[in-house]
Amino acid sequence: MNTFYNSLLDITSPKNIFQNEPMKNHTTFKVGGNADYFICPSTPQEVISIIHLCQENNLPFYVIGKGSNLLVADSGYRGVIIQTNKNLNHLEVKGNEIIAQAGASLLAISDLAIENSLTGFEFASGIPGSLGGACIMNAGAYDGEMKLVLKEVTALDENYELKVFKGEEMGLGYRTSIFSQKGYIVLAAVIALKEGNQEEIQAKVDDLTKQRESKQPLEYPSAGSTFKRPVGHFTGKLVREAGLSGKMVGGAMVSTKHNGFIINAKNATAADVVNLIDLVIATVKEKFDVTLEPEVKRIGEF
């Protein structure tokens, strides 16, 4: 592994390389063991070079942003985590468009849109993730979704070559995209917005923030809405009617404030969260014959 570390130093600064890094510090669930390597590249080319180095050394790798939709095993991750949020977060405004790197937070993009009186991104202001993950999952809330504002996405394809995707090429659907379907790595995107009134935009963001604070358990670590919305149903209603509101496994709990959220209520482990997710899925299936599908991604050995 020393050879691998030395090779990393040829690619990026030593300040961007961490070993045995606790992943609980880099996920919104605040759980997970250590990653062998945790790297924060400074440029898209560094991302590509690190991936090639991992391939040459037969080391697994996984790219993350803010870790807002991620569950890392208690045993950690045997391989390399590449994180975009720390350094690959540049934002630029050109006319009605925001050009953003994948690590930029949705909150930072929203703030920039407000500052420049651009409307259309208000729905994403409270989603606690980064742009890359939002493109991959076609993130959405309050009748908005990334599909409505994404003009183009720059990503690494299956050969880890840069490619620009536009329009239908992005395959954006409910919580899905070509990027999630084929494992492409998002590096940047162009967000197309419209001119608006700054006070009205700010007022809408403030209103959505109040709605989130009143309806969601934001005071606890979580990954947001835990399950995708099943066709014809509301997840929270199914979970509540299944008698699972407040149900706990270890330190993980089904939120009583929003039954679609599983929260880290009391020093939960990743195993606690997974076991509770599985319990919710099994119970809802048994009672209503509806199969809930988790939105949360799992990495490591569960």
Image (spheres, rainbow, N blue to C red):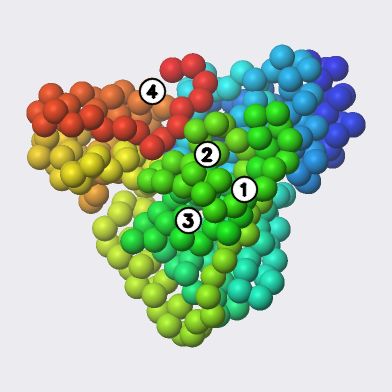
Give the x, y percent position of residue 33: 53, 25
Q: Which of the marked residues, 2 or 4, is nearer the chain's N terminus?
A: 2
Alpha carbons under labels 3 and 2: distance apart: 13 Å
Amino acid type at image mark 4: Ala
Alpha carbons under labels 1 and 2: distance apart: 9 Å
Please tell me the numbered disc located at residue 165: 1
Question: 54 left or right of 144?
Answer: right
Please tell me the numbered disc located at residue 273: none
Amino acid type at image mark 2: Ile
Mark nearest the camera among 2 and 4 is: 2
Q: Which residue is mark 2?
A: 178
Q: Which of the marked residues, 3 or 2, is nearer the chain's N terminus?
A: 3
Residue at the (35%, 26%) spot, across then down: 274
Alpha carbons under labels 4 and 3: distance apart: 31 Å
Alpha carbons under labels 2 and 4: distance apart: 30 Å
Tell me the element at label 3: helix
